[in-house]
Image: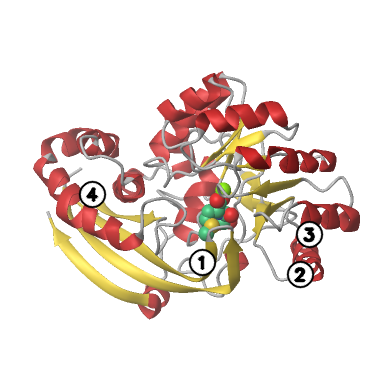
């Protein structure tokens, strides 16, 4: 495929309610979208980077800059390779550049979408999906009080979500979990996500969560503390799941081999793209680990791609693949919905969804065309 140019389009998407985690509170998303124009047609990519480098070192202005100054020129200079191998060549061409995996993921996604739309092939089929619909879990932010939390959780259970994930941080962990268990019972699939907020000194405290039969505790320690997670896993019974720490199939293999995790949250943007996400799935499955698909508050574009990824055989735990209306009043695509707790996996060409032009234009804050 010949890459003729890429549009960098920024959209401002207000959230339906503030989303608070251990690293901050979001009320809106400033999202970078890529529209790749190729010889075979157009494709869309979504960059999952947040506005501030608080989840990881990437942030949306930096991803636009690294695409503009390094990645897109490099792809233009490797048009031969791109013509021959398409999206499979993107990460190979960009490998010499360190990090910026969310930016790499976005351009690989846009090129892959263009190719698949042209071939009439779905994202699900390309990645190896084996299900037509996937169970939908939901991520619940930190709120001001326990009663408010119980209302929020009750609302999502009424909406049909099959798994509840609670954001936790020091001072908001054992009590909220206890309250949810007491109110909704022991059968509700329940897990927690600390986003690196604890240290090994908190091990004894985190062991108090063992009484609540959680599916997992996600990323309790900082992302580079692989050995710390292995030590923590020996001190608590709740299975340790890694998110921020797993940036590639190689780092997944390393974390698994030292016993740092028994479950992995796979996020394509964090690991450089959907193709690497499948490799991590394969490594985890080969070691007998369960994986699930995490979320980065994506628009319908990334949400649709994540639903397809979550349909691979090793994704045996519900993912953070909630309906569009969990975060957005009006999504830029036709809204993704759940019924009886499941989301249909898109089966159209490419992502299977597209931005609705007038909706996209209404939320666009900037657009920049980069000819290649
Ligand atoms: C701003 S929070 C983004 C990262 C967070 N994501 C979620 O909690 C799920 C968000 C979603 O459902 O898209 C995580 O660490 O897993
Ligand atoms: Mg997480």
Label 3 sits on residue: 157
In percent of the image, x 48 and y 38: which residue is there?
245
Lower position in the chain sequence, tag 2 or tag 3: 2
**Residue denoted by label 4:** 40
Label 4 vs label 1, nearer the camera: 1
Cα separation between marks 2 and 3: 19 Å
Q: Quadrant of residue 259?
A: top right
Q: Secondary structure at mark 4?
A: loop
Indicate the secondary structure of the residue bearing disc 3: helix
Disc 2 Cβ-to-ligand 1 distance below 8 Å: no
Q: Earlier in the sequence, mark 4 or mark 3?
A: 4
Name above or below for residue 97 compared with residue 281. Answer: below
Question: For residue 145, which numbered disc appears in the image?
Answer: 2
Residue 258 in view here? yes
Residue 196 falls left or right of residue 369: right
Compared to residue 14, the image places residue 173 above or below, namely above
């Amino acid at each position: 495929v010949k890459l003729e140019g890429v549009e960098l389009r920024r959209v401002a998407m207000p959230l339906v309610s503030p989303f608070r985690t251990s690293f901050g509170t979001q009320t809106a998303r400033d999202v970078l979208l890529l529209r790749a124009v190729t010889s075979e047609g157009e494709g869309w990519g979504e960059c999952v980077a947040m506005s501030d480098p608080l989840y990881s070192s990437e942030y949306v202005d930096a991803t636009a800059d690294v695409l503009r100054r390094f990645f897109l020129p490099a792809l233009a200079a490797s048009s031969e390779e791109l013509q021959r191998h398409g999206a499979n060549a993107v990460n190979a061409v960009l490998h010499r550049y360190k990090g910026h995996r969310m930016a790499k993921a976005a351009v690989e996604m846009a090129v892959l979408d263009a190719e698949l739309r042209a071939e009439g092939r779905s994202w699900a089929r390309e990645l190896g999906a084996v299900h037509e619909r996937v169970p939908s879990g939901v991520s619940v932010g930190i709120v001001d009080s326990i009663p408010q939390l119980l209302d929020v959780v009750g609302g999502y259970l009424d909406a049909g979500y099959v798994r509840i994930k609670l954001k936790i941080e020091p001072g908001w962990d054992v009590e909220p979990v206890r309250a949810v268990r007491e109110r909704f019972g022991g059968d509700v699939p329940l897990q927690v996500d600390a986003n690196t907020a604890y240290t090994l000194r908190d091990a004894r405290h985190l062991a108090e969560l063992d009484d609540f039969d959680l599916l997992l505790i996600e990323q309790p320690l900082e992302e580079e503390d692989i050995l710390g997670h292995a030590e923590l896993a020996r001190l608590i019974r709740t299975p340790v799941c890694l998110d921020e720490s797993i940036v590639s199939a190689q780092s997944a293999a390393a974390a698994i081999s030292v016993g740092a995790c028994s479950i992995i949250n796979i996020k394509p943007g964090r690991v450089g793209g959907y193709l690497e996400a499948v490799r991590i799935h394969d490594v985890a499955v080969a070691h007998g680990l369960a994986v699930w698909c995490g979320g980065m508050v994506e628009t319908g574009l990334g949400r649709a791609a994540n639903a397809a990824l979550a349909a691979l055989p090793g994704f045996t735990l519900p993912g953070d693949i909630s309906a569009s209306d969990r975060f957005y009043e009006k999504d830029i695509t036709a809204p993704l919905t759940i019924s009886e707790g499941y989301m249909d996996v898109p089966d159209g060409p490419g992502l299977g969804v597209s931005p609705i032009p007038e909706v996209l234009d209404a939320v666009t804050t900037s657009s920049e065309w980069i000819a290649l």
